[in-house]
Image: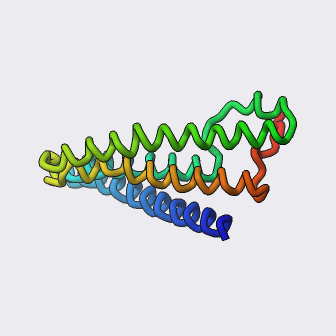
Amino acid sequence: MLQSLKHGIERLLLVIISITLCCMVVLMLWQVFTRYVLATPALFTEETLRFTMIWMALLGAAYCFGSRKHLSLDLLVFLGPMWWRKGLAMLNGIISIAFASFTMLIGGWGASMSAMAQLSPIMQVPMGMVYLAVPVSAGLIILLQALNIVLIGLGQLAPVEDVQETV
């Protein structure tokens, strides 16, 4: 059940990220078209692209933490026996949760709430809505890392993915 919940959240994140990327492509094409063909650039596209990129990057980071595809150095993990691998993988998850909790969730929420009165120059969107990407992705990182820790502890998830050498 936990495994299917984790995969469901990851799939939902992939769908949202994919839709966001498609929207960004359309907006970029519209920007180029209005600038070079119509000779009057659409003003909202640059700001929208910037805000969309922020959300996409942070949701992508949450996906990477959940699927354990983020950049990591696993040398120490591979040197020890299985109990060592499990322990280090779980410690890594706990450290990630601590960072996401204190820095991203608490700090991001404070930054977001303090910026709600500030409006973006062109679209007049509260900047706090843009900054909300940080605590939202932090919540997802915390949830997915907690699921990873539990699944590793139960033996339903390998502590480290097998390394495949590429030549």
Q: Is residue 85 above or below residue 62?
A: above
Tell me which corner region of the image, top left, top right, bottom left or bottom right, holds residue 94. Answer: top right
- Judged from this view, the residue extending furthest toward the right is 81
Would you say residue 35 is visible in this rendering?
no
Q: Is residue 99 above or below residue 17?
A: above
The residue positioned 82% from the left and 41% from the top of the image is: 83
Quarter in which the C terminus is drawn: top right
Q: Is residue 88 above or below residue 55?
A: above
**What is the count of numbered marks?**
0
Closer to us: 50 or 151: 151
x and y percent of residue 16 in the render? 46, 62
Q: Is residue 82 above or below residue 6?
A: above
Closer to us: 37 or 78: 78
On the picture, is 151 further left or further right than 42?
A: right
Closer to us: 2 or 64: 2
x and y percent of residue 47 in the render? 25, 47
The residue positioned 84% from the left and 32% from the top of the image is: 80
The residue positioned 45% from the left and 56% from the top of the image is: 21
Quarter in which the N terminus is drawn: bottom right
The residue positioned 67% from the left and 43% from the top of the image is: 90
Colour theme:
rainbow
Would you say residue 158 is visible in this rendering?
yes
